[in-house]
Image (tube, rainbow, N blue to C red):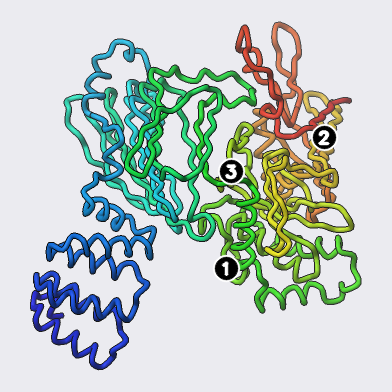
């Protein structure tokens, strides 16, 4: 511990002894060089760093240390030469790139971006009469991206939101920084609340999240954070980003700036707007700036498919096939079946060797659904974009959509089936059509090729019938990933659908008989496709009392009356057949209500599709989209006597 106690000479003696005993421990050489550098004995530091480089001549961080030693000696030429090698061997060493520009007498690239006076913007907003009636105003939304090549890309986001009503404040509870920890590094440069008196309250960031607990009318939320990308492989030489210009609140200034190597080719597109950037030259780089000011808030209409955002997308990825090949190379390493997976497939196929391919697929699908589907219907929070090893998913029984789908594909291939992954832009609201190639997928399923037919299988949706597709997957944008690199093909985005899938439908038939003031209802419910999964997952794992209690709770809430369910029967509750049938009787007292001498009653609908929002506007600009009205394309309910 002499180094920690400041006894540097003693520390060097100990380190040199360790080097003598283990002359190939290169990190000890580096440590000695660093200690001498700290002691300002640059000549000895140089001797030891040169020994380090002789042992390991292809490690960028060693050249970085050498460069700093030369710089301390005043030898700028050698400092520059060493720093260039540091960047060459470690392209994603952002500090080395920054130091190199400084040694060569150039400004930081980030210094070329427009600088914002946050406090001035807030002061002006408080006194600006045009904002007095606004609930909130986005005073600034500024995104700045730098691409330096070979994996070194980063972007900074700065936002300033002025809050002018308590109702809006109540919606601002927290902010989660959007990044993938395995391939990106988050640096929060500023997280604060600007108060009306001109002071600022710093907010602590914990686990990538900031909480807002002391907001008041007139405050502004200020965030500035940077995300550094550490992509490898084919993606290391590419960049992509999307940026929204407008919002549900007025926007005072919305800006997107990009600094990119001059020779790097990329494309950009903008939705709902014709906006050209202004350009400038910075050394070997070019800077592009898209900016808009005084944007009106987005005025929504109920039940529309149109995305009203103005969105800029930039991407240097040449095409979707580039992404498919990249994902195939990396994911197929994860999909390779391990001993445990192979043994499980042997167990499942024992006695089923003569089954057809589709029957074998059903067997594997049922196993994955029962053992892994529950509570795993999540998108891409884990391990960024690449599935974890199937052995890990198999053991811990936890994973996101790409992990569970990769396990299914691995087991299917082990059983001799032709299977591969499919990446999706799952619809989280309105349709999303990516403007340019990117890897912003949020879901993953599997594809099977059997007897000339394609089956799409989502093993992450618990209790889902085989090859059924949920409404938010239908017609979503999909990218097929080849089953191995050797069989790579030209991939393009397609709209996901299949004629071989079960139809999603909800059909309910109710017969009512009256006994005095009691209405006895005999109801038969048919659910097919993904609609059967929703009901099956609620009821399959409960006992009969639990199922009756669950249904009682649901229907009592709908009818606002206490009901009693009897004679409950199911078909296909325990299996994954396409159609689930539920049959039961229920009754409730005080069926009638007296109004002006008339007896009136409310029909016991299970699904009320009416919404007054349809008629809330005198004039519509956009057509109705019934897909946002109900999730199922077939809904039929009849009530008779």
| Separation (CA) of disc 1 from disc 3 | 34 Å
Q: Secondary structure at mark 1?
A: helix
Q: Nearer the viewer, residue 556 or 465?
A: 465
Residue picked out by circle 1: 396
Report the residue at 41% width, 46% height from top: 147
- Name which quarter of the figure residue 502 lies in: top right
- Name which quarter of the figure residue 115 lies in: top left
The answer to whether 511 is drawn above or below residue 354 in the figure is above
Q: Nearer the viewer, residue 48 or 552?
A: 48
Q: Are marks 3 and 2 in contact (CB under 8 Å)?
A: no
For residue 427, side relative to residue 601 (left or right):
left
| Separation (CA) of disc 3 from disc 2 | 40 Å
Label placed on residue 437 = 3
Q: Secondary structure at mark 2?
A: strand
Position of residue 245 measured from the top left corner of the image (x, y, whole percent): 45, 27
- Name which quarter of the figure residue 429 lies in: top right
Regarding residue 8, the answer to whether it shows in the image is yes
For residue 195, side relative to residue 324 (left or right):
left
Q: Which quarter of the figure is the C terminus placed in?
A: top right
Residue picked out by circle 2: 507
Report the residue at 18% width, 78% height from top: 47
Report the residue at 42% width, 22% height from top: 249
Q: Earlier in the sequence, mark 1 or mark 2?
A: 1
The answer to whether 563 is drawn above or below residue 576 in the figure is above
For residue 231, side relative to residue 345 (left or right):
left
Q: Earlier in the sequence, mark 1 or mark 3?
A: 1
Q: Secondary structure at mark 3?
A: loop
Position of residue 187 measured from the top left corner of the image (x, y, whole percent): 32, 49
Q: Nearer the viewer, mark 1 or mark 3?
A: 3
């Amino acid at each position: 511990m002499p180094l920690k106690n400041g006894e540097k000479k003693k520390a060097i003696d100990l380190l040199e002894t360790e080097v003598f005993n283990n002359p190939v421990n290169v990190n000890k050489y580096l440590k000695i060089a660093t200690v001498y550098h700290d002691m300002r004995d640059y000549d000895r530091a140089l001797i030891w760093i040169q020994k380090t480089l002789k042992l390991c001549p292809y490690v960028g961080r060693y050249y970085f240390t050498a460069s700093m030693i030369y710089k301390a000696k005043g030898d700028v030429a050698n400092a520059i030469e060493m720093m260039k090698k540091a960047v060459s061997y470690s392209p994603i060493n952002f500090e080395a790139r920054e130091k190199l520009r400084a040694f060569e007498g150039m400004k930081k690239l980030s210094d070329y971006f427009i600088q914002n006076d946050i406090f001035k913007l807030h002061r002006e907003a408080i006194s600006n009469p045009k904002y007095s009636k606004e609930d909130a105003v986005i005073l600034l939304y500024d995104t700045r991206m730098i691409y330096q090549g070979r994996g070194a890309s980063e972007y900074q986001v700065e936002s300033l939101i002025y809050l002018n009503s308590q109702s809006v404040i109540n919606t601002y509870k927290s902010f989660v920084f959007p990044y993938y920890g395995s391939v990106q590094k988050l640096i929060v440069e500023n997280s604060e609340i600007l108060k009306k008196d001109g002071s600022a309250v710093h907010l602590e960031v914990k686990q990538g999240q900031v909480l807002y607990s002391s907001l008041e009318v007139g405050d502004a939320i200020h965030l500035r954070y940077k995300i550094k990308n550490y992509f490898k492989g084919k993606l290391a030489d590419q960049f992509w980003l999307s940026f929204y210009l407008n919002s549900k609140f007025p926007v005072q200034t919305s800006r997107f700036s990009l600094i990119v190597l001059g020779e790097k080719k990329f494309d950009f597109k903008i939705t709902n707007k014709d906006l050209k950037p202004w350009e400038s030259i910075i050394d070997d780089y070019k800077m592009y700036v898209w900016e808009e000011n005084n944007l009106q808030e987005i005025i929504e209409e109920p039940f529309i498919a149109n995305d009203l955002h103005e969105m800029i997308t930039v991407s240097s990825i040449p095409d979707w096939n580039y992404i498919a090949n990249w994902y195939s190379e990396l994911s197929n390493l994860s999909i390779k079946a391990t001993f445990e997976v192979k043994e499980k497939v042997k167990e499942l196929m024992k006695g089923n060797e003569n089954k057809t391919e589709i029957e074998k697929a059903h067997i594997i699908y049922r196993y994955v659904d029962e053992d892994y589907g529950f509570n795993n219907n999540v998108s891409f929070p884990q391990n960024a974009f690449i599935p974890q090893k199937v052995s890990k998913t198999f053991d811990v029984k936890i994973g996101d959509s790409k992990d569970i789908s990769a396990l299914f594909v691995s087991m299917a291939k082990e059983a001799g089936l032709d299977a591969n992954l499919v990446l999706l832009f799952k619809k989280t609201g309105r349709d999303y059509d990516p403007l340019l190639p990117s890897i912003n997928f949020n879901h993953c399923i599997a594809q099977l090729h059997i007897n000339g037919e394609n089956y799409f299988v989502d093993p992450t949706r618990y209790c889902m019938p085989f090859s059924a597709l949920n409404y938010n997957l239908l017609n979503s944008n999909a990218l097929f990933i080849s089953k191995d690199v050797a069989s790579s093909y030209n991939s393009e985005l397609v709209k996901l659908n299949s004629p071989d899938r079960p139809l999603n439908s909800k059909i309910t038939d109710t017969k009512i008989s009256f006994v005095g003031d009691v209405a006895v209802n005999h109801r038969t419910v048919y659910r097919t496709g993904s609609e059967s999964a929703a009901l099956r997952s609620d009821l399959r794992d409960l006992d009969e009392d639990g199922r009756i209690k669950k249904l009682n709770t649901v229907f009592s809430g709908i009818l606002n009356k206490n009901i009693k369910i009897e004679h409950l029967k199911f078909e296909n509750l325990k299996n994954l057949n396409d159609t689930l049938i539920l049959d039961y009787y229920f009754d409730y007292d005080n069926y009638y209500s007296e109004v002006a001498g008339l007896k009136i009653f409310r029909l016991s609908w299970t699904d009320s599709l009416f919404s007054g929002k349809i008629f809330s506007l005198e004039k519509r600009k956009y057509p109705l989209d019934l897909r946002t009205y109900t999730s199922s394309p077939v809904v039929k309910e009849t009530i008779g006597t």
